[in-house]
């Protein structure tokens, strides 16, 4: 059939409908692709949020487990005066009670200002720092056994982290007296009390 014999007026409407159908189909395909791409992005975003939430949940679960394990230990150390502020009033009360039980002739004490504790061995304490307060004791004794009794009583009543750093014993007078209130010896002892905490707002 020759082109001249084609009745274009008859086919015009069909061709227009065909073009419109092609345009609509193409638009539908583009719209479907964009819709699928948008949903895919949303799915990936929601999946990432889910994975993040699951990771956070597991992290919180692990942290709760660590808290359950270590919080009671931390509280126990805090109550004992090892972590946190030092408990000078408790130290002094323990010292007085021990001196009374040991029946030493006389005792004087002095506590130095708290300062950073220096060690020859490096210690990894993280964000915390170790502080030391030195209690100096001057004690009048009837005999050396009274000193050991006093130290034993102190060791039984004191709480926290402490250690005897030095102790000197000297004889007083040339003769030994057996009187109950006699003073035959004098002792000077230093006891270091250690506390651990993060900051030092008021070291005194």
Image (cartoon, grey):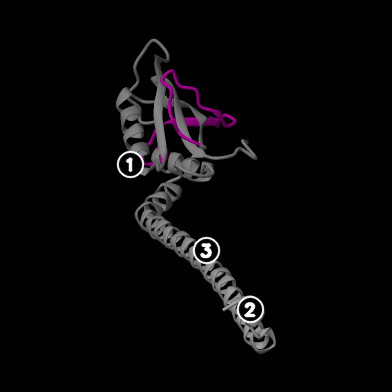
Give the camera-side residue of 32 and 171: 32
What residue lies at 48% left-to-right and 35% top-to-bottom?
126
- Residue 59: which quarter of the image? bottom left
Which quarter of the rendered picture does the N terminus lie within? bottom right
Q: Position of residue 129 (x, y in %)?
A: 52, 34
Which is more foreground, mark 3 or mark 2? 2
Magenta span contains residue 113 = yes
Looking at the image, tell me whether mark 1 or mark 3 is earlier in sequence order. Answer: 3
- Which-is-in-front pick, marks 2 and 1? 2
* Residue displayed at 60% across by 76% down: 2
Label 1: how many residues lie within 10 Å, few (<14), some (14-19) or many (20+)?
few
Local secondary structure at mark 3: helix
Residue closest to the eye, 185 or 87:
87
Residue 46 counted in the magenta span: no
Q: Residue furthest top?
A: 174
Give the foreground label among 1 and 3: 3
Which quadrant: the C terminus? top right
- As displayed, is residue 54 above or below residue 124? below
Q: Which mark is residue 19?
A: 2
Tell which residue pokes out farthest to the left in this image: 145
**Cα distance in 3D space between marks 2 and 1:** 101 Å
The span shown in magenta is 99-126
Q: Earlier in the sequence, mark 2 or mark 1?
A: 2
What residue is pinned by disc 1? 156
Q: Please tell me whether mark 1 sits on a helix, a strand or a loop.
A: helix
Nearer to the camera, 93 or 6: 6
Residue found at x 35% / y 32%? 151
* Residue at 29% from the left image edge and 27% from the top image edge: 145
N-terminal label among 3 and 2: 2
Which residue carries the number 3 mark? 45
């Amino acid at each position: 059939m020759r082109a001249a014999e084609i009745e274009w007026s008859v086919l015009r409407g069909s061709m227009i409908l065909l073009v419109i159908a092609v345009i609509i189909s193409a638009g539908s395909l583009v719209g479907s692709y964009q819709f699928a791409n948008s949903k895919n992005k949303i799915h990936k975003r929601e999946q990432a949020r889910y994975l993040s939430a699951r990771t956070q949940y597991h992290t919180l679960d692990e942290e709760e487990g660590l808290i359950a394990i270590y919080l009671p230990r931390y509280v126990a150390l805090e109550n004992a005066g090892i972590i946190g502020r030092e408990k000078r009033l408790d130290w002094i009360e323990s010292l007085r009670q021990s001196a009374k039980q040991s029946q030493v002739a006389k005792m004087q004490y002095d506590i130095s200002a708290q300062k950073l504790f220096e060690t020859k061995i490096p210690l990894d304490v993280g964000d915390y720092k170790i502080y030391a307060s030195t209690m100096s004791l001057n004690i009048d004794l009837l005999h050396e056994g009274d000193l050991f009794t006093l130290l034993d009583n102190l060791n039984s009543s004191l709480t926290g982290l402490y250690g005897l750093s030095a102790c000197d014993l000297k004889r007083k007078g040339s003769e030994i007296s057996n009187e109950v209130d006699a003073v035959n010896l004098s002792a000077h002892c230093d006891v270091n009390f250690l506390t651990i905490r993060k900051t030092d707002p008021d070291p005194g």
